Amino acid sequence: MLFPVPGRIRDLRDAVHAFMTERVEPAEPVLNAGGVEARELFERLRKEAKAEGLWALGHPAELGGGGLPFLDYVYVNEVQGRSEWGQLVLGTFTLQDSIMLHKYASPRWRERYLAPMVAGEVSPSFAMTEPDVAGSDPTGLRTTAVLDGDEWVINGRKWFTTGAAAAAYTTVMCRTEPDDAPPHKAFSMIIVPTDTPGYRIVRETPVLGIHGGHYEVDYDDVRVPADNLLGPRGHGFVIAQDRLGPGRIFHCMRWLGQAQRAFELMCARLEQRTAFGEKLGAKQLMQQHVFDSYAEIQAARMLTLQAAERIDAGDQARVEIATIKVVGARMVHNVIDRAIQVHGAAGLTDDLPLSRMYRHAREARLYDGPDEVHIQSTAKRILRRVGAGS
């Protein structure tokens, strides 16, 4: 961390940092390989996190979580984000879903899923993206839900439903309203238990060669009770925004951790490696990598803290969140790319975490909205403010 961490959160952040660097990061080769050994190690790490008071820190306290304010959570989530396994081992992978259920679910679904989800006993999944529809324009989603008596009948196909194979349920965004309904009021969210007849996993979709648990799922006359509706009918986009807005800044927090880890690896390499009779760090072109990475990480941190501060103040912070989503995605890609360059051929191998980190970094410019959409929407909002004289 290259600026002071507030005293109120420093000890907790240091404990999470130690847990990540001393236990999670060394465990990555086994966890990435999968299998029985990986599952046993994963469960052991989760038990240790719970025993040490590091579990579910960002979840609301009334649900059994740590109840950290958003701004404090930035500092913790950054160090947690050093590894893709951090949020899974420390119980915060489900945070977006717990926020969504906490706010919109009926008492029955809150009782069934919320506490077990925060405790890590069940996993959720979320289905919005479809293979044949532009994800940048979700008003074109084709999955439908028709009310038949006291049941919703769902038909369609989703993909990139992360964690569907292990999930207890999937929250499905689907069209529930007539063709003449306003596009942003035509969709609803419906809870579908994954053991419901007609819910069929088609395949796990590899992403840049990584099997990361992203699934394509077919919905064939899936029937669920009418009260599985999440929130009011036709409010799918409102709920999605409530879920995706915080989710985007959660991503940015973790990207900072990834970038900081890559930066540390890069600087260590520059100090340890020699070429043409001197340390790599003595080369001016290598020093350029250090300067650019430092500047980009620091800028992204400040933008992330600004967005978190606005959210803590009760603001939706749409301009700030969209800005850091774009800046953060570019930053993490650039820093990891430079770290690979500094490591040369070694950076391309799986002997280091950089290759896997690099592939995940490339995903960042697409999921939760491609860069182009955030740039356009943010520019429009800024221009409207200027036009309004604010």
Image: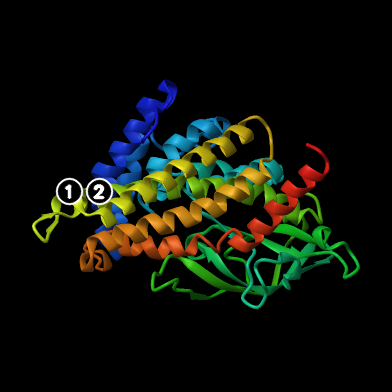
| Amino acid on which the number 1 mark rests in the picture | Glu
Q: Which residue is mark 1?
A: 271
Whole-percent x, y for residue 213 in the image: 45, 65
**Viewer-nearest residue: 384 or 150:** 384
The x and y percentages for residue 359 are: 40, 65
Could you tell me which secondary element the residue under label 1 belongs to? helix
Image position of 265 (left or right of 122)? left
The answer to whether residue 290 is left or right of residue 69 is left
Report the residue that reaches farthest toward the top.
Answer: 7
Q: Nearer the viewer, residue 63 or 252?
A: 252
Q: How many marks?
A: 2
Q: Is residue 20 visible?
A: yes
Question: Residue at image x 26%, y 51%?
Answer: 265
Q: Is residue 312 above or below residue 319?
A: above
Judge whether residue 113 can be spotted in this image.
Answer: no
Q: CA distance from mark 1 to mark 2?
A: 6 Å
Q: Is residue 220 above or below residue 41?
A: below
Picture quarter with the C terminus:
top right
Crowding around mark 2 (Cα neighbors within 10 Å: few <14, some 14 to 19, many 20+) is some
Q: Quadrant of residue 55?
A: top left
Q: Where 39 falls versus 119 (above or below)? A: below
| 387, 197: nearer the viewer | 387
In the image, what residue occupies the spot 33% across and 42% down? Answer: 47
Q: Amino acid at mark 2?
A: Cys
Residue drawn at x 33%, y 59% is 338
Q: Quadrant of residue 334?
A: bottom left
Extreme-right residue of the structure: 180
State the image coordinates of residue 230 (x, y, percent, origin top left): 72, 52
Residue furthest out toward the front: 284
Cβ–Cβ below 8 Å for labels 1 and 2?
yes
Determine which residue is flagged by label 2: 267
Outermost residue, left side: 277
